[in-house]
Image (spheres, rainbow, N blue to C red):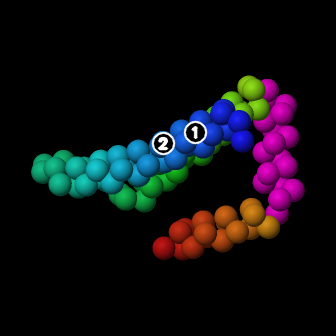
């Protein structure tokens, strides 16, 4: 593993940790404020998942040296050709949506 892979993994872990900490704190703060309309938790979850998706797509694009063609090929190979991993992820997602 070269230094850039290590930095990418460490950066991803750091971003995920900060994301979860800030999400919990901001939801708690939003729920405890008085005189403010409350938000729906599922809306916040969907918004944060969309932000994570955009971040992940950008990280893959960066990993492919900003080449859109290589980025699309990487996504195709990872998502469509690696069907068992995709099914495993979608099983977890389907449980979340059934809640």
Considering depth in this image, is 82 or 53 the residue closer to the camera?
Answer: 82
Measuring from the top left, give residue 70's x and y in whole percent.
Answer: 83, 33
Residue 15 is tagged as 2
Callout 1 crowding tier (Cα within 10 Å): few <14, some 14–19, many ≥20 = some
72 vs 38, left or right, is: right
> Which residue does the numbered mark 1 point to in the structure image?
55
Question: Which element type, helix, strand or loop, lies under badge 1?
Answer: helix
Cα distance in 3D space between marks 2 and 1: 10 Å
Measuring from the top left, give residue 21's x and y in whole percent.
Answer: 36, 50
Measuring from the top left, give residue 36's x and y in whole percent.
Answer: 18, 48
71 vs 38, left or right, is: right
Question: Which residue occupies the extreme left position in the image?
Answer: 34
Do the residues under discs 2 and 1 have CB atoms within 8 angstroms? yes
Quadrant where the image shows the N terminus? top right
Examine the structure image and report whether residue 79 is included in the region drawn in magenta. Answer: yes
Question: What residue is at 66 percent from the left and 32 percent from the top?
Answer: 4
Question: What residue is at 81 percent from the left and 42 percent from the top?
Answer: 74
Check the image and report above or below for 93 versus 12. Answer: below
Measuring from the top left, give residue 90's x and y in whole percent.
Answer: 67, 66
Examine the structure image and report whether residue 42 is included in the region drawn in magenta. Answer: no
From this viewpoint, is residue 37 visible?
no
Residue 60 image-quadrant placement: top right
Of helix, strand and loop, which mostly describes the magenta segment?
A: helix
Magenta region: which residues?
67-83
Question: Which element type, helix, strand or loop, lies under badge 2?
Answer: helix
Foreground disc of the pair 2, 1: 2
Check the image and report above or below for 58 versus 83. Answer: above
């Amino acid at each position: 593993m070269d230094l850039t892979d290590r930095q990418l993994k460490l950066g991803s872990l750091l971003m995920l940790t900060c994301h979860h900490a800030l999400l919990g704190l901001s939801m708690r703060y939003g729920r405890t404020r008085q005189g403010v309309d409350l938000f729906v938790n599922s809306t916040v979850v969907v918004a944060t998942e969309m932000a994570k998706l955009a971040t992940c797509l950008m990280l893959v694009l960066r990993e492919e040296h900003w080449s859109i063609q290589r980025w699309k090929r990487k996504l195709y190979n990872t998502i469509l050709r690696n069907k068992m991993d995709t099914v495993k992820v979608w099983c977890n997602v389907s449980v979340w949506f059934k809640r």
